[in-house]
Image: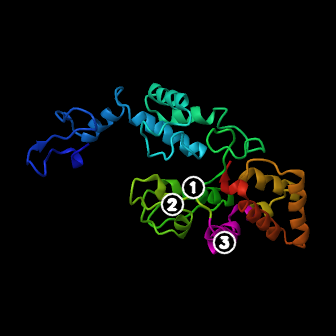
């Protein structure tokens, strides 16, 4: 809307009353409307609106594929075409067909062959435009903290929030959290996508390796590691449980052999061995990155 809050405003030079309206649209009709956001939403999803569906389709694609069909994703203009215009046209049409149901649209993206491609090989390693292979990207701060909490079996406690609340449910951008800060959760001071950073840093690596908070989750008396160590499972079965609970797969033969040596090095300290194995898997790129 041109006028802030949907209210008519006076022109700063002529003093003429300027009615509120959306970009390229007629003056908005707020008669019999209890919430003016409904008028805005109706314009955004209107069949003759050329902006919204295309922009959202490009943003959703960028979120899952690591790069938009149009880059930068906020630069939607005729002189900055998509790398694959027919594909973006099809995505826009599909989003409209789904009546802007983002869950249904996401399902389509995740079930596509393009999303399920493997990592780069020598033939396409330098491709940055045509989505010929999967591009690993760092897991967002909130998702990573939830993943650590889930795999260690110890939920995060946020001040003022009930125990068990997940990081992705915490809407308060002023929540003091060192983890959020170093892993790039935005403070939401602007609407720019660039406010969130997924770039790796030394601070992130050191936090995962040495921080008392992560180590406390790993060694918690009611955590996953303690329960596995106190169970009747064999060493090999414990390794399987850790890999299934963190990487959702069984370990390779080489990984199993390496992790088995942790039990031998622990000299009978089964709990220490289990904690070391869980710690090592939590610090792998496979756990930290979305492949």
* In magenta stretch: residue 208: yes
Q: Residue at x 80, y 68 (%)?
A: 271
Q: Are marks 1 and 2 in contact (CB under 8 Å)?
A: yes
Left or right relative to 213: residue 273: right
Q: Earlier in the sequence, mark 1 or mark 2?
A: 1
Residue that mark 3 sits on: 206
Residue 154 is a magenta residue: no
Q: Tell me the distance, in whole angstroms, between the alpha carbons under discs 3 and 1.
A: 17 Å
In the rendered structure, which disc, 3 or 1, sits on the residue that comes first in sequence?
A: 1
Q: Is residue 57 above or below residue 173?
A: above
Tell how many labels. 3
At 48% from the left and 55% from the top, the residue drawn is 194
Q: How far across and down, in percent of the image, does residue 67 sit?
A: 57, 45
Vertical placement of residue 212 versus 251, above or below: below
**Would you name the residue on which mark 2 appears?**
185
Magenta segment, prevailing SS (helix, strand or loop) = helix
In terms of depth relative to the viewer, which is nearer, 189 or 240?
189
**Residue drawn where x is 40% and y is 53% of the image:** 191
Residue 255 left/right relative to 15: right
């Amino acid at each position: 809307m041109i006028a802030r809050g949907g209210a008519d405003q006076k022109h700063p030079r002529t003093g003429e009353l300027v009615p509120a309206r959306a970009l390229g649209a007629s003056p908005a009709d707020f008669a019999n409307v209890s919430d003016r956001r409904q008028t805005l939403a109706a314009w955004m999803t209107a069949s003759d609106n050329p902006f919204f569906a295309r922009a959202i389709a490009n943003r959703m694609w960028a979120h899952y594929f690591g790069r938009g069909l149009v880059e930068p994703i906020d630069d939607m203009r005729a002189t900055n075409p998509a790398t694959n215009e027919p594909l973006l046209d099809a995505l826009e049409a599909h989003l409209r067909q789904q009546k802007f149901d983002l869950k249904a649209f996401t399902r389509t993206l995740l079930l596509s062959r393009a999303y399920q491609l493997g990592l780069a090989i020598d033939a396409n390693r330098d491709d940055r435009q045509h989505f010929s292979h999967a591009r690993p990207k760092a897991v967002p701060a909130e998702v990573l903290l939830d993943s650590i909490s889930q795999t260690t079996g110890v939920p995060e406690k946020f001040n003022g929030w009930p125990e068990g609340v997940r990081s992705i449910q915490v809407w308060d951008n002023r929540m003091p959290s060192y983890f959020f800060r170093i892993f790039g959760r935005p403070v939401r001071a602007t609407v720019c996508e660039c406010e969130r950073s997924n770039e790796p840093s030394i601070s992130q690596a050191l936090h995962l390796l040495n921080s008392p908070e992560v180590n406390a989750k790993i060694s918690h008396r009611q955590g996953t590691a303690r329960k596995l160590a106190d169970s009747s499972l064999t060493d090999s079965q414990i390794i399987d449980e850790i890999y299934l609970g963190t990487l959702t797969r069984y370990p390779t033969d080489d990984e199993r052999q390496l992790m088995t040596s942790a039990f031998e090095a622990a000299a009978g300290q089964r709990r220490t061995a289990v904690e070391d194995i869980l710690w090592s898997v939590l610090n792998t790129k496979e756990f930290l990155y979305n492949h």
